[in-house]
Image: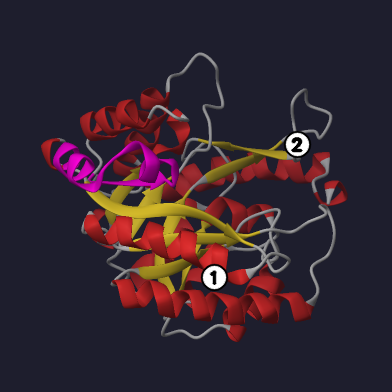
Amino acid sequence: MSSRFSRRRFVGGVAAVGASTLVSRSLPAQSRPRLKVGYASITWGKEERQAIDDISSVGYAGIQMRNNAVSEFKPDELRTLLQQRNLKFVALSSGDVSLDAPVEPQFDTHVTNAKFVKALDGFYLQILDQLKPYPRKATPDECVQLGKMLTELGKRVSDVGVKLGYHNHMNTLSEHPENLQRVMDASDPKYVGLELDTAHYVAGGGDPAEAILHYRDRLLFLHLKDVVDIPLDTPGARYPFKFVELGRGRVNLPAVMSALRKTNFQGWAIVELDKVPDASHTPKQCAEISKEYLQNQLHVTV
């Protein structure tokens, strides 16, 4: 994989950032998609309560939380806290599924998590999968198996009253666009929607704007996320890229917004940043940087 992330590509990505900024500045306000914008608590690690306070104070309308919230909060407590902070519970990151493990225990966990989402009047359960050992190429048959597995899980999650969103992600079967296509083709659109992550799609070699147009009928919600290339020998680096605040990477976010407008997408977009990329910033400051970019450059109301 590292061969695809050459210095030439890194320099090209930096140039793309500049071009992206120029395009975003010319994006007319009437062209903005009518999004509902939330923020993911993952940046705060285990500090979920601080994440709720900060995301609310910055002004985001919704929140996506990780599955540790299921053990940390009782639904009534969390519902009250979110209502006090004027935050909508949008989605729960429920973890992953594995083709190599017994199915029923996995499904039981995710259905329990779906019930937690439902108790909070939330909408979506996020699911991804495992690609082990990594790195290796996923086979077409594995993608088909995963699609069928997601369909069965999606039926059970649907019975709870929640929608299942499959999250394209590096280090999973769907890390490259052609395999995401195989997974989606093998799953039932009635029970499995796509949670498109713009940065992971770019890191996997795809164009998220094209994906929005292509999957317009499967797009459940999305992660607005940005990424830059880094040398693989960077201390602490596991992959030849890292995630950054919106507008600071090589994801063509103006093109993403244009595609959302063309498809008349009016659902939720969750801004996500796995961790603070610059130690001089706090998670809250990162959330503010992305909000400023959304509002001032992309004309998206947060």
Position of residue 209 measured from the top left corner of the image (x, y, whole percent): 51, 65
Which residues fall within the magenta stretch? Answer: 61-82
Q: Quadrant of residue 234?
A: top right
User: Callout 1, which amino acid?
Assistant: Ala
Q: Which residue does the image show at 67% across and 66% down from the upper left?
A: 174
Question: What residue did someone put label 1 on?
Answer: 211
Q: Quadrant of residue 240?
A: top right
Left or right of 236 in this view: 146: left
Which numbered circle lies on residue 238? 2
- In the image, is residue 235 above or below residue 98? above
Circle 1 residues within 10 Å: few <14, some 14–19, many ≥20: some
Q: Is residue 244 magenta?
A: no
Q: Which residue does the image show at 21% across and 59% down from the upper left?
A: 121
Residue 218 visible: no
Q: Which residue does the image show at 23% across and 41% down from the upper left?
A: 78
Q: Which quadrant does the C terminus fall into?
A: top left
Circle 2 residues within 10 Å: few <14, some 14–19, many ≥20: few
- In the image, is residue 234 above or below residue 170? above
